[in-house]
Amino acid sequence: KVFDDFVNNLGKEPDIATKVTLVSFHPEFLRWRGLPENVLTGSVVQSYRDLSAFQQSHDHMLCSATVLEMSNAMFGRRRIKVRFHDDQKKEQYVPTDWIKTVDNDIGSPLPDNAMHQAPYPTVHLIRNDDLATVRVRDVSRVKRMNTQKMMKLGWEGVLLAAAAAKDR
């Protein structure tokens, strides 16, 4: 938490925020979680809405929704598809951490967390000028491929790969 706060606050500096993108890595990175075991397709949950540019709505905008899809090729299990009850046509993929259950349960950590784990706390500084040369669809393709690989590996595969790397 302290490391994440540092990275988030560093990015708020006006000069830095316009010139670089910060990506954090940490040995105990566990930000992404699945849903609690009692949440299934068809379950009714409370969720924030995705307003725009991946910003969640304010607390007072928590809405009732039905879970339509628990996993998909694009987002893996980090985002789920829901249909909001106040607008039966409104379906969105929302991050699992935007889902609130009656008991405020949280799910198990996802294998995707391993992509942001490193032996030591690390911050990658990526020049925004360099990012401007990359096509959005190429970034999306790489993210999709990484998600699919992590889903296929699972935690067991991640641990085996880490052990093999240590033995080299």
Image (spheres, rainbow, N blue to C red):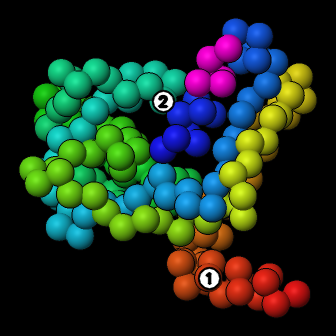
Left or right position of 26 against 129: left
For residue 85, side relative to residue 55 (left or right): left
Please say if 152 is above or below 129. below
Q: Is residue 56 left or right of residue 148?
A: left
Residue at horizontal 39%, vertical 22%?
A: 51
Q: Nearer the viewer, mark 2 or mark 1?
A: 1
- The span shown in magenta is 9-13
Q: Nearer the viewer, residue 25 or 144?
A: 25
Residue 82 in the figure: left or right of residue 103: right
Q: Tag 2: residue type?
A: Phe
- Give the number of the disc on residue 168: none
Q: Magenta includes 124?
A: no
Residue 126: percent from left, percent from top: 82, 34
Report the quarter where the C terminus lies.
bottom right
The amino acid pointed to by label 1 is Leu
Image position, residue 97 (x, y; %): 35, 46
Instruction: Return the disc, 2 or 1, that comes first in the chain's sequence.
Output: 2
Judge whether residue 11 is colored magenta: yes
Query: Percent from the top left, x then y, of residue 47?
Result: 24, 38
Dominant secondary structure of the magenta stretch?
loop
In the rendered image, the vertical position of residue 114 relative to residue 47, given as above or below: below
Q: CA distance from mark 2 to mark 1?
A: 31 Å
The residue carrying pointer 1 sits among few (fewer than 14), some (14 to 19) or many (20 or more) residues within 10 Å by Cα, namely some
Q: Residue at x 72, y 58 (%)?
A: 120
Q: Which residue is mark 2?
A: 54
Name, please, the residue furthest toward the left: 102
Residue to which mark 1 is pinned: 159
